[in-house]
Image: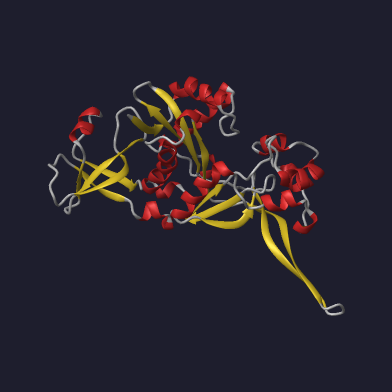
């Protein structure tokens, strides 16, 4: 049995262990940094700041059979402020034409931009390698749980939700776009620049080209990576598109990975959320069973959810398998929110 819940202080060792198995900037193998992230998340769940940029929400996937943390996903309530802008490259076109020789070209362009009143960002999805392609679709559960929380608390997030996807990297883990552009202006490797940008973005505005970058001047490997996703990220891209996200014609200034966005109110999972009163009610033929992620009150956690079947009755009431209610000692009746899991 797997549960999805808000991170807790005693998850530190488990998260550190996960960070040593897989290398992610959002979960570095550093106990002090992880501890700070956990503390920030707990504060956000309990007492969110009116300054959204300070609010980070971390969700964990726990295997109840082993008590292991198998994955993490995150929401940053605001990505992009006056102090720490959201930087991007706009992907555009510029037309050139000469009447003298009756010749014209359409050039692909990249231009640095920034946003100081940015959107909410979903990211930081990390799943233990052994659990990929699980029949329980654990990666999908970790991804969807963020939308469940936003459906329950829309006032804690910005009207636009943003996601940055990983582009294809070469066999050494380098970005072709970074090698063609970034390295020439910033004099550091891709990983160093990416890590530095998490704490200080001044160098981007100071050193990066401010005018149009013509894609025709870039090596073919760099041109072909712009706005594309790596093979492992393709399922994430398809999932986002299926629930309403669209390519924003913006890419990461370092690696060219695409940015996807959707208004919070238009995200399919949130539009189709299920609310009702969870009661102890026998299932009958009129009840409609649905596969959902459902959140309900739990005495130990600020947020708690599971994947389950939910029976929707026509009277504003919903019910679940009594074994699940007994297992988690769910108080009845109580108001619940669920989103489709399809």
**Quadrant (top left, top right, bottom left, bottom right) of the N terminus:** top left
Residue 23 appears at what percent x and percent y?
59, 29
Residue shown at 23%/28% (left/top)? 327
5 shown above or below 162: above
Residue shown at 53%/25% (left/top)? 35
Residue 77 appears at what percent x and percent y?
50, 44
Residue furthest right as drawn:
100
Residue 220 appears at what percent x and percent y?
75, 52
Quick check: can you spot residue 158?
no
- Judge left or right: residue 138 versus residue 289: right
17 shown above or below 85: above
Total labels drawn: 0
- Judge left or right: residue 16 versus residue 319: right
94 shown above or below 259: below
- Judge left or right: residue 308 versus residue 93: left
Kindly indicate the quadrant of the structure image that contains residue 297.
top left
Residue 43 appears at what percent x and percent y?
46, 33
299 shown above or below 142: above
Give the colour scheme shown: secondary structure
Q: Nearer the viewer, residue 29 or 35?
A: 29
- Judge left or right: residue 160 versus residue 200: left
Quick check: can you spot residue 65?
yes
Q: Nearer the viewer, residue 41 or 292?
A: 292
């Amino acid at each position: 049995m797997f549960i999805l819940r808000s991170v807790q202080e005693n998850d530190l060792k488990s998260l550190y262990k996960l960070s040593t198995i897989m290398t992610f900037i959002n979960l570095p193998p550093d106990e002090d940094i992880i501890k700070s992230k956990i503390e920030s998340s707990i504060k956000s769940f309990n007492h969110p700041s009116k300054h959204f940029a300070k609010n980070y929400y971390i969700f964990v996937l726990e295997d109840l059979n082993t008590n292991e943390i198998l994955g993490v996903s995150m929401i940053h309530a605001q990505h992009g402020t006056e102090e720490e802008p959201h930087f991007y490259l706009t992907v555009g076109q510029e037309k050139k034409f000469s009447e003298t020789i009756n010749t014209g070209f359409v050039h692909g362009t990249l231009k640095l931009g920034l946003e100081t009143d940015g959107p909410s960002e979903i990211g930081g999805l990390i799943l233990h390698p052994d659990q990929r392609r699980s029949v329980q679709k654990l990666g999908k559960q970790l991804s969807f749980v963020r939308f469940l929380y936003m459906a329950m608390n829309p006032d804690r997030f910005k009207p636009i939700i943003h996601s940055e996807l990983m582009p294809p990297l070469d066999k050494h883990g380098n970005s072709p776009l970074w090698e063609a552009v970034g390295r020439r202006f910033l004099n550091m490797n891709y990983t160093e620049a990416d890590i530095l940008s998490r704490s200080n973005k001044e160098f981007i505005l100071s050193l990066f080209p401010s005018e149009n970058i013509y894609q025709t001047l870039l090596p073919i490997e760099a041109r072909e990576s712009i706005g594309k996703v790596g093979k492992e990220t393709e399922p994430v891209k398809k999932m986002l598109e299926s629930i309403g996200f669209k390519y924003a014609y913006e890419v990461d200034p370092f690696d060219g990975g695409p940015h996807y966005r959707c208004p919070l109110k238009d995200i399919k999972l949130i539009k189709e959320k299920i609310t009702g009163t969870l009661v102890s009610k026998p299932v009958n033929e009129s009840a409609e069973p649905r596969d959902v992620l459902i959140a309900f009150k739990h005495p130990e956690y600020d947020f708690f959810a599971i994947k389950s079947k939910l029976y929707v009755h026509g009277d504003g009431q919903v019910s679940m398998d009594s074994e699940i209610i007994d297992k988690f000692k769910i108080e009845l009746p109580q108001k619940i929110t669920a989103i489709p899991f399809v």
